[in-house]
Amino acid sequence: NLDRGVPIVGTVRNTLGQPIAGALVQARLENGSSLSMNTDAFGRYRFDGNNPGTARLIAGAPLHRTVMYNNITCTSSCNFPDAATPLPLIVGSTAVADFTLPEAPSLTVVASLSNDLITNLFTTFRLSLMRPNGSVVTEASISSFSPNVTLTNVAPGDYILRLQSPNTVPR
């Protein structure tokens, strides 16, 4: 349908072929504009109304590696959009770009309360794993009754651990 421009469609799956809901797909069009959206429950995305030319695409999801349209898996930094293969956008056709995202290595974080932190046997502490920008990734309760906590499936990266009791400021 020409009044909708050239649609870009595709599906994002894991290496087992299962759709990944909520994956972020980004497109950089030839004219310099950018598009982004999250996949639906079936791993599908669709960008409508694009002018003919080319688009460079990238997809990523939590606990998965980011992949460019040409199936180059990004490592710590990705030279996007320049390294992505251009996807032709041709009038009267639908441009299809499917992605397969490999799982990213994940970490396990183990935290334990030391005896010098336990001053009140009935105090429950809140342990927060945060990104450097302050956004909380996950939280857990830790107390003298359960002085150890394990956080699993943590994506590699830089984090801040914050321990807070009801009577103290975060540290």
Image: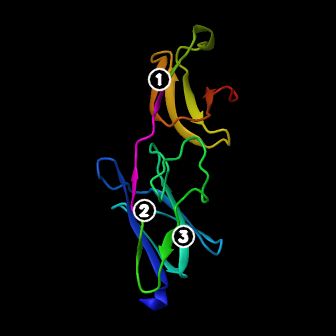
Residue 60 magenta-drawn?
A: no
Label 3 sits on residue: 55
Task: Give the magenta part as a residue range.
Answer: 98-109
Say which label, 2 or 1, has the lower sequence index: 2
Does residue 150 lie above or below 11 as drawn? above
Checking the image for residue 39, the label placed there is 2
Mark in the foreground, 2 or 1:
2
Does residue 119 lie above or below 4 as drawn? above
Name which residue lies at 45% across and 56% down: 23
Checking the image for residue 62, the label placed there is none
Q: Dot 3 surroundings within 10 Å: few (below 14), some, or many (20 or more)?
A: many
Q: Dot 2 surroundings within 10 Å: few (below 14), some, or many (20 or more)?
A: many
Does residue 63 lie above or below 85 as drawn? above
Q: Is mark 1 on a helix, strand or loop?
A: strand
Q: Which amino acid does label 3 sit on?
A: Ala
Q: What residue type is labelled 1?
A: Val
Say which label, 1 or 3, has the lower sequence index: 3
Q: What is the distance, in whole Å, between disc 2 and disc 1 at their CAs? A: 33 Å
Given contact means CB atoms under 8 Å apart, are the residues at marks 1 and 3 in contact?
Answer: no
Q: What is the distance, in whole Å, between disc 2 and disc 3 at their CAs? A: 18 Å
Does residue 19 lie above or below 90 as drawn? above
Q: Is mark 2 on a helix, strand or loop?
A: loop
Q: What is the distance, in whole Å, between disc 1 and disc 3 at their CAs? A: 45 Å
Q: Which amino acid does label 2 sit on?
A: Thr
Label 1 sits on residue: 149
Q: Which percent across, then down, holds residue 153?
A: 44, 35
* Residue 165 sits in quarter: top right
Mark in the foreground, 1 or 3:
3
Name which residue lies at 47% across and 18% down: 148
Name which residue lies at 39% across and 62% down: 98
